[in-house]
């Protein structure tokens, strides 16, 4: 062989390796410790003050995410604001702050009252006592325009579960009879009472609906009556009037947004199928200081790390696309009740039946750096790819070890699973929900300095390689037969 031929052969060999880089090599080329570290140190920095939904700082995080996607060459999504945002019209609903109730001449104190339902009400009406308020107790009574008073629970049971369940039924009966409201007399322990009170006085979140009013006419009040004085007085008197007043609920708009981006696939057929790569980018903000004087919940594990799995796959796919297309979604308001993902699943920017897989990442913490924990690993046919990819980088993929925590149904993936889209959650390695996890889970200590970046490099590489294998597989991933979401999946894709 001449020298010239030899160098030509060498050139071809070299170009072959250059142009046919394996998925493994492609992953190693972009997923690197320093890049990962930079993202996490920014997203979980004190300056972003725990990325609480509605805060000014979470908007800075959102801007960082959209510009990072742009920098990687990730394309805008049709219909998204500025190409990379989906506004989520969230509102915080504050329970009415003041309410009063008096029966005859007796005014009850606020410690004795818990408002469960109703807002913007002021009325005076006759009361009707219905004992424990069973179906029979309600049967022969004229209740229209009156206030129904019942004992909590049933004749035979007064445990909290029964109390809550029966309360719903009594309220239904009272509504059906067109009563003004329902008052229940309770004999809970002081501990139970204050816990219930705290829970029901708190605020909740909702997606804004245009028709929502700040008052609702039916009310339900719980009254503390340990000594049963009220119950006794009700039995002794024939007719009594009651006065009720409940202030209005207050709705505060909470501006929030999902961040999105996409990469078109390379295969003329398979590019019509998308894999969603998702994670929530919000956390729980600022709270009480711990013993070290730290009041910022930085959320490095939860969920800056999940966000960086998505950024890592976005960089890899923007530079070297897979056969299937990719949709990246970074959710807002997970910590407020999975609102960002719920809103997206109800208002998708691209048709849901083209989304063949949702590869979510959410994290509480880790206690085993030899594994990656995939909540729902065995529930989809992509299990083999995730196992192989993890092994490639020295990790063992294991399924959710803490079934009792119901983790599959506690993260954003569930809103896609409910629609039929196979959707596991890729998480840092944990073999139990133990004290090591609780040390950081929703704690001020969840800082970027406390994370093992050697492990993270393997972890992110395992996620990105899994993604590439799933998105290049000619066979479309699906739920395994017998899974709870299998039938809704069949339904979703039947007219694809
Ligand atoms: Zn969380």
Image (cartoon, rainbow, N blue to C red):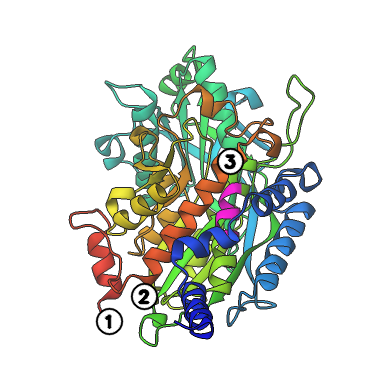
* Mark carried by residue 495: 1
The answer to whether residue 474 is seen in the rendering is: yes
Residue most extreme to the top: 227
Identify which residue, 88 or 18, lies in the foreground: 18
Residue appearing at x 60%, y 34% in the figure: 442
- Against 300, residue 57 (above or below) is below
Q: Is the magenta region chiefly helix, strand or loop? A: helix
| Mark 3–mark 1 distance (CA, rounded to whole Å) | 45 Å
Secondary structure under badge 1?
A: loop
Q: Is mark 2 within 8 Å of ligand 1?
A: no
Q: Is mark 3 within 8 Å of ligand 1?
A: no
- Against 177, residue 466 (above or below) is below
Secondary structure under badge 3?
A: helix
Residue appearing at x 24%, y 69% in the figure: 490
Q: Quadrant of the C terminus?
A: bottom left
**Lower sequence index among marks 2 and 3:** 2
| Mark 2–mark 1 distance (CA, rounded to whole Å) | 8 Å
Q: Label 2 belongs to which residue? A: 353
Q: Label 3 belongs to which residue? A: 454
Q: Give the crowd class for mark 1: few <14, some 14-19, many >=20 residues within 10 Å.
A: few
- The answer to whether residue 311 is magenta is yes
Q: Evaluate if marks 2 and 3 touch, with contact meaning CB atoms under 8 Å apart.
A: no
Q: Which residues are magenta?
A: 305-312
Q: Give the crowd class for mark 2: few <14, some 14-19, many >=20 residues within 10 Å.
A: some
Q: Position of residue 151 (x, y in %)?
A: 40, 26
- Residue 212: quarter of image: bottom right
Secondary structure under badge 2?
A: helix
> Relative to residue 198, is residue 27 drawn left or right?
left
Q: Quadrant of the N terminus?
A: bottom left
């Amino acid at each position: 062989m001449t020298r010239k031929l030899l160098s030509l052969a060498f050139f071809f060999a070299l170009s072959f390796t250059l142009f046919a880089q394996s998925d493994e090599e492609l992953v190693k080329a972009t997923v690197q410790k320093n890049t990962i570290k930079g993202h996490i140190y920014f997203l979980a920095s004190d300056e972003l003050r725990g990325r609480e939904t509605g805060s000014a700082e979470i908007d800075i995080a959102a801007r960082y995410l959209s510009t990072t996607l742009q920098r990687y060459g990730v394309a805008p999504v049709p219909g998204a604001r500025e190409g990379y945002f989906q506004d989520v019209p969230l509102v915080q609903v504050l329970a009415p702050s003041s309410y009063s109730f008096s029966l005859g001449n007796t005014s009850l104190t606020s410690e004795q009252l818990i408002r469960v339902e109703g807002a913007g009400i002021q009325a005076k009406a006759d009361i009707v006592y219905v004992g424990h308020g069973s179906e029979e107790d309600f049967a022969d009574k004229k209740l229209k325009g009156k206030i129904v008073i019942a004992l909590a629970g049933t004749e035979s049971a007064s445990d909290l579960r029964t109390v809550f369940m029966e309360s719903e039924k009594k309220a239904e009966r009272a509504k059906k009879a067109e009563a003004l409201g329902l008052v229940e007399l309770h004999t809970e322990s002081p501990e139970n009472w204050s816990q219930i009170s705290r829970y029901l006085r708190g605020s909740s979140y909702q997606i804004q609906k245009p028709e929502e009013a700040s008052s609702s006419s039916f009310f339900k009040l719980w009254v503390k009556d340990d000594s049963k004085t009220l119950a006794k007085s009700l039995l002794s008197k024939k007719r009594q009037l009651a006065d009720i007043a409940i202030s209005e609920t207050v709705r505060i708009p909470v501006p929030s947004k999902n961040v999105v981006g996409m990469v078109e696939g390379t295969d003329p057929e398979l590019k019509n199928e998308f894999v969603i790569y998702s994670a929530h980018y919000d956390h729980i903000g600022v709270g009480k200081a711990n013993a070290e004087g730290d009041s910022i919940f930085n959320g490095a594990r939860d969920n800056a790390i999940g966000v960086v799995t998505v950024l890592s796959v976005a960089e890899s796919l923007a530079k070297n696309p897979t056969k299937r297309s990719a949709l990246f979604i970074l959710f807002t308001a997970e910590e407020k009740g999975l609102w960002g993902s719920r809103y997206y699943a109800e208002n998708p920017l691209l048709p849901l039946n083209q989304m063949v897989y949702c590869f979510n990442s959410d994290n509480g913490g880790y206690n085993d750096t030899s594994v990656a924990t995939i909540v729902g690993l065995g529930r989809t046919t992509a299990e083999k790819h995730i196992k192989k990819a993890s092994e490639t980088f020295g990790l063992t993929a294991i399924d959710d070890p803490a079934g009792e925590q119901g983790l599959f149904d506690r993260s954003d993936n569930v809103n896609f699973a409910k629609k039929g889209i196979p959707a596991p959650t890729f998480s840092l390695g944990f073999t139990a929900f133990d004290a090591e996890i609780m040390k950081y889970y929703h704690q001020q200590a969840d800082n970027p300095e406390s994370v093992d970046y050697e492990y993270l490099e393997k972890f992110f590489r395992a996620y990105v390689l899994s993604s590439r294998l799933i998105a290049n597989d000619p066979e479309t991933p699906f739920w395994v037969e017998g899974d709870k979401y299998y039938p809704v999946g069949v339904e979703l894709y039947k007219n694809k």
